[in-house]
Image (cartoon, rainbow, N blue to C red):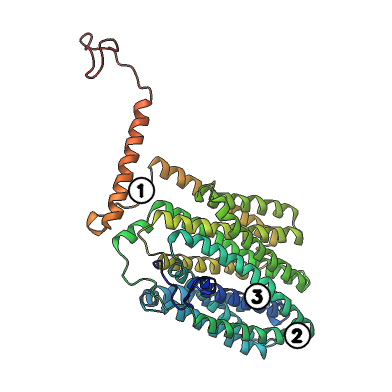
């Protein structure tokens, strides 16, 4: 976590009133994020009228499943091996953002001439892999450009809100180009946007995410029962996001729905995610993070159940909106839980690892409706699967929280004093001592079974007056 001070890479004020012109490191990350998200929205808009969605669904399943499987490799193999080295290198995650922007720019440039060719599939999925890699790098970089850990969740909320706004704004010029020039013009514009995003990323301060290897304190805290339970629930939500996206994409193609519905569902997902990211910090003022995460799982369960009964594209839109809201609010709550329960952990490194796992689960969720044909997995059955998965995740999460509260599950491993920070250790020991005193007083107030006096009247208790005896 960066210490308060003059923002590196910005314009330093030279007199009174100049503070308004300071460009902070977070502002540079936010600008880059807005531009790159706008580029992703343009890709989705351009692909809606291309071979990617015009080819027969059964013919596309094999190719899409193959490329989805290929997206797993960079996260499952490269991240654990190269990720630590990138975190230690000064400017390593910034370089990752620049490279992922350039890869998407190149992919868009190539797709301009291949929108009616089968080469579109590998190029589109190269852009998908680069996009997933960007989100991992961004998750690692954000904690290094905020002043305090208390600002981290608020910063992520602002980025999510900014992403929704920039994605919506990108549809205005993108829609005009699509109407008068076609998908090729939209894809070419996306290539320019990603190139501009790479230039903006170069202005992000070159910081090291983690200069030291993982210590016992960090390892022990991230293995805490509360964090593991929250990460498992959040992984289910991410899997549902990928499952819903490809389930409805193939469903729209099977019923030959208008491309307008692709835009409607994409807008619903964006709005839902944006509302969830904005709502979560407000809910945290009165509710625990665990309750918010469990609540969005319950809401997803109920919504998917109703949509399975009602069906229709209106129901599908409502489900996408709710799933986007659940993913946005759940992510903010999960970030807060990690910050609270793992104060000794390096936030950038830990968030990057969790984000890598969530991206893998997203791909796994997307693979299920891609591999299974409609005679095996209909859209209504898919809604039922979503309801069951979300309900199971909510039930197991609440059960885990109750077990943790009763002390039936192992708590985070106690960190040896020799590897703990002395100040943090004293603060935690004091808090533990105070909690122990509170528990002891509560136990003392509980009425216990009365035992008959043995050997006559024991006499006054030490410290009591004869009257009280």
- Within-10-Å neighbours for mark 1: few <14, some 14–19, many 20+: few
Q: Is residue 75 above or below residue 306?
A: below
Q: Quadrant of the N terminus?
A: bottom left
Who's the residue at 68% across and 68% down the image? Answer: 266
- Local secondary structure at mark 2: loop
Q: In the rendering, at what x and y percent does residue 368 appear?
A: 59, 66
The circle on residue 182 is 2
Q: In the rendering, at what x and y percent does residue 33 appear?
A: 56, 74
The circle on residue 41 is 3
- Local secondary structure at mark 3: helix
Q: CA distance from mark 3 to mark 1?
A: 44 Å
The circle on residue 410 is 1
Q: CA distance from mark 1 to mark 2?
A: 58 Å
* Left or right placement of residue 49 versus residue 225 in this view: right
- Local secondary structure at mark 1: loop
Q: Earlier in the sequence, mark 1 or mark 2?
A: 2
Q: Residue furthest bottom?
A: 113
């Amino acid at each position: 976590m960066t210490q308060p001070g003059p923002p590196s890479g910005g314009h330093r004020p030279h007199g009174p009133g100049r503070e308004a012109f300071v460009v902070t490191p977070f502002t540079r990350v936010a600008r880059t994020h807005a531009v790159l998200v706008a580029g992703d929205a343009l890709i989705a808009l351009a692909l809606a009228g291309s071979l990617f969605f015009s080819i027969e669904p059964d013919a596309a399943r094999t190719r899409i499943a193959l490329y989805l499987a290929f997206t797993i490799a960079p996260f499952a193999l490269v991240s654990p091996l190269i990720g630590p080295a990138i975190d230690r290198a000064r400017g390593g995650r910034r370089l990752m953002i620049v490279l992922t922007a350039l890869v998407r720019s190149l992919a868009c440039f190539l797709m301009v001439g291949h929108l009616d060719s089968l080469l579109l599939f590998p190029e589109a999925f190269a852009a998908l892999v680069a996009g997933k890699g960007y989100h991992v790098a961004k998750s690692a970089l954000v904690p290094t450009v905020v002043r305090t850990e208390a600002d981290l969740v608020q910063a992520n909320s602002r980025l999510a809100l900014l992403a929704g706004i920039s994605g919506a704004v990108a549809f205005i010029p993108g829609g005009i180009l699509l109407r008068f020039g076609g998908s090729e013009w939209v894809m070419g514009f996306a290539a320019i946007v990603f190139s501009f995003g790479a230039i903006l990323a170069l202005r992000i301060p070159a910081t090291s995410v983690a200069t030291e290897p993982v210590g016992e304190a960090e390892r022990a805290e991230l293995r805490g029962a509360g964090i593991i339970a929250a990460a498992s629930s959040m992984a289910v939500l991410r899997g549902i996001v990928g499952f819903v996206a490809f389930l409805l994409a193939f469903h729209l193609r099977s019923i030959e729905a208008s491309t307008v519905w692709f835009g409607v569902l994409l807008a619903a997902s964006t709005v839902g995610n944006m509302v969830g990211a904005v709502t979560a910090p407000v809910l945290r003022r009165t509710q625990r993070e665990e309750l918010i995460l469990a609540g969005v799982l319950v809401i997803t369960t109920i919504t998917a159940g109703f949509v399975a009964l009602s069906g229709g594209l209106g129901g599908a839109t409502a489900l996408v909106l709710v799933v986007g809201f659940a993913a946005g609010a759940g992510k903010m709550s999960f970030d807060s839980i990690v910050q609270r329960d793992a104060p000794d952990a390096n936030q950038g490194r830990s968030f990057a690892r969790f984000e890598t796992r969530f991206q893998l689960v997203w791909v796994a969720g997307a693979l299920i409706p891609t591999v299974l044909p409609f005679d095996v997995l209909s859209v209504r059955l898919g809604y039922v699967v979503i309801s069951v998965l979300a309900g199971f995740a909510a039930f197991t999460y609440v059960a885990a929280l109750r077990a943790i509260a009763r002390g039936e599950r192992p708590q985070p491993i106690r960190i040896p004093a020799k590897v703990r920070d002395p100040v943090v250790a004293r603060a935690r020991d004091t808090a533990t001592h105070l909690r122990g005193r509170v528990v002891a007083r509560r136990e003392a107030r509980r009425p216990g079974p009365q035992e008959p006096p043995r050997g006559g009247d024991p006499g006054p208790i030490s410290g009591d007056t004869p009257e009280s005896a």
